Amino acid sequence: MLKNTILGLCLLALTGTALAFDLVDSKGHKHSLAQYKGKWVLVNFWATWCPPCRMEIPDLIALARSNPKNLVVLGVAMDYQDPKEVIRFAESKAINYPIILGDDKVVSQIGEVNGLPTTYLYNPQGKMVAYNVGPLTREAVETYMAEKNKSANK
């Protein structure tokens, strides 16, 4: 794997498309990789007690708000005692993207979670192209996507 230190995202050397995922959010809505074909999909594993996770929430909210036609943000809450606690936390932070209550089954559909936060990024063709362990910023994600879009249009 190559580490892109400027963006804070690691590039993944993957071939083919990523494994499909089928997730259900806290409101009962289904989310699958296939339904977001043509959009970037950012899947963020986080926890309510995690300071770096809390730090990146405003940037994830801004990402979800700034480009809804081209980017989907999905938050996967991990390591929680009570689902209601996660939902109350998300409401108190005005999180505007779907929250999935994570477990081992959810993790197995996306990829390893070796620390929180962990973020996976899928390109519009459904291929997992980057991941990041630790907090990331709106700027890093937008810059990464712009660079990939620019090279794809050449």
Image (spheres, grey):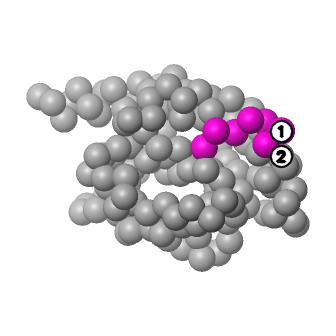
- The residue where tag 2 is placed is 89
Is residue 96 found left or right of 121 in the rendered image?
A: right
Q: Is residue 114 visible?
A: no
- The part of the chain drawn in magenta is 91-97
Q: Is residue 20 visible?
A: yes
Residue under the image location 37 percent in, 52 percent down:
36
| Residue type marked 2 | Phe
The quarter in which the C terminus is drawn is top left
Q: From what the image shows, is residue 20 above or below residue 148?
A: below
Residue under the image location 38 percent in, 69 percent down:
19
Magenta stretch, main secondary structure, is: loop
| Residue type marked 1 | Ser
Q: Foreground: 109 or 99?
A: 99
Question: From this viewpoint, which residue is outermost toward the left?
Answer: 154
Q: Foreground: 148 or 32?
A: 32
- The residue where tag 1 is placed is 92
Residue under the image location 50 percent in, 25 percent down:
66
In the structure shown, which secondary structural element does the residue marked by tag 1 occupy? helix
Q: Foreground: 89 or 103?
A: 89
Marks 2,1: beta carbons within 8 A: yes
Give the image location of residue 122, x and y in percent: 39, 50
Give the image location of residue 16, x and y in percent: 24, 63
Question: From this viewpoint, which residue is outermost toward the front?
Answer: 28
In the structure shown, which secondary structural element does the residue marked by tag 2 occupy? helix
Label for residue 118? none
Q: Residues within 10 Å of mark 1 (few under 14, many from 20)?
A: few
